[in-house]
């Protein structure tokens, strides 16, 4: 197949934070045993970005996720949206990974399964952890250029060049960068509204077993670099956030006097620092 080979790593996010359970010993997130999972919303923007490039230049889009076996269901949604293939990287040795170990697993999996890829396209971040670590870390493992906050791209297939446009929200400016492929891109989360998921394609993916499952017997990744053993992050302690007691004071009167009263009280409580 001509055109581009685009890899879109996606995550099984927890849609309802109240459903999250933490292991009392390791303090890791428990993703099995009834915790619902969904396709991370910002990964849908990344998948849309990739699908637009495929629509314009041809090729194929492959989604990939490191998740427990239950992640198979949300990967079927990526095929329903238009991905050509989907791979679930799943093995008990990958459990308990922080972003460093996860990025290592994702990077090495892509290297071994799709050595001739052109682009890796990430979502900006996930809704349940919001670290935004993965694109930069995978770029570091693979020694590839990385462009973040991408909103659009143009490709020169014959020269294997890509011109990426990114948007810097705080500055309100657009920038363009030209690179030789392969490169890694993360997509600005407020861009590329995703297309609908086709129920027909999703059902076909389920009935025909289109999500391929890959374990470490196939990947043969070093066990010291994956899962809990490969994660230097330590969660030393977890506490429930205590609600702030509010005084519930109400000032009625002239707006100017109300503003003065509010400023005086906030200053007194340490909420405002005078210059």
Image (tube, rainbow, N blue to C red):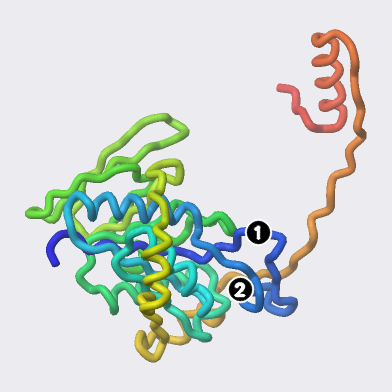
Q: Residue furthest bottom?
A: 217
Indicate left or right for 222 with 271 as reference.
left
Disc with the residue nearer the chain's start (2 vs 1): 1
Is residue 222 shown above or below 24? below
Indicate left or right for 2 with 19 as reference.
left
Q: Which residue is mark 2?
A: 31
Q: Secondary structure at mark 2?
A: loop
Q: Nearer the viewer, residue 195 or 117?
A: 195
Indicate left or right for 124 with 182 as reference.
right
Q: Do the CB atoms of the residues marked 2 and 1 lie less than 8 Å apart? A: no
Residue 134 appears in the rendering: yes
Cα distance in 3D space between marks 2 and 1: 12 Å
Q: Secondary structure at mark 1?
A: loop
Q: Position of residue 193 (x, y in %)?
A: 41, 44
Q: Nearer the viewer, residue 113 or 37?
A: 37
Q: Which residue is mark 1?
A: 16
Residue 105 appears in the rendering: no
Q: Position of residue 63 (x, y in %)?
A: 36, 66
Q: Residues within 10 Å of mark 1 (few under 14, many from 20)?
A: few
Q: Nearer the viewer, residue 163 or 5?
A: 5
Viewport quadrant of the N terminus: bottom left
Q: Position of residue 208 (x, y in %)?
A: 36, 78
Viewport quadrant of the C terminus: top right
Q: Position of residue 226 (x, y in %)?
A: 47, 80
Give the residue displayed 22% in from the left and 52% down from the top: 55
Q: Residues within 10 Å of mark 2 (few under 14, many from 20)?
A: many
- The image quadrant that residue 211 belongs to is bottom left
Residue 189 has which mark? none
- The image quadrant that residue 169 belongs to is top left
Q: Residue furthest left?
A: 158
Give the residue displayed 54% in from the left and 70% down from the top: 98
Give the residue displayed 77% in from the left and 28% down from the top: 272
């Amino acid at each position: 197949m001509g055109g581009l080979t685009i890899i879109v790593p996606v995550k099984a996010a927890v849609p309802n934070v109240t459903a999250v359970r933490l292991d009392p010993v390791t303090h890791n997130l428990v993703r099995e045993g009834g915790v619902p999972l969904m396709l991370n919303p910002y990964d849908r923007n990344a998948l849309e970005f990739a699908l637009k490039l495929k629509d314009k230049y041809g090729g194929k889009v492959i989604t990939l996720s490191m998740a427990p076996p239950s992640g198979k269901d949300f990967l079927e949604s990526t095929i329903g949206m238009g991905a050509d293939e989907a791979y679930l990287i799943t093995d008990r040795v990958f459990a308990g990974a922080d972003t460093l170990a996860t990025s290592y697993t994702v990077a090495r999996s892509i290297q071994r399964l799709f050595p001739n890829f052109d682009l890796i396209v990430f979502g900006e971040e996930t809704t349940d952890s919001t670290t935004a670590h993965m694109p930069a870390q995978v770029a570091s493992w693979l020694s590839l250029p990385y462009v973040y906050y991408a909103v659009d791209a143009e490709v020169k297939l014959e020269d294997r060049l890509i011109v990426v446009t990114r948007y810097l929200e705080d500055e309100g400016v657009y920038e363009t960068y030209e690179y030789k492929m392969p490169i890694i891109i993360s997509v600005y989360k407020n861009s590329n509204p995703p297309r609908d998921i086709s129920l027909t394609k999703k059902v076909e993916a389920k009935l025909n077993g289109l999500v391929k499952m890959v374990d470490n017997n196939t990947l043969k990744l070093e066990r010291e670099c994956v899962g809990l053993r490969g994660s230097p992050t330590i969660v030393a302690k977890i506490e429930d956030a205590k609600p702030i007691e509010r005084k519930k004071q109400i000032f009625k009167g002239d707006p100017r006097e109300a503003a003065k009263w509010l400023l005086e009280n906030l200053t007194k409580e340490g909420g405002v620092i005078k210059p």
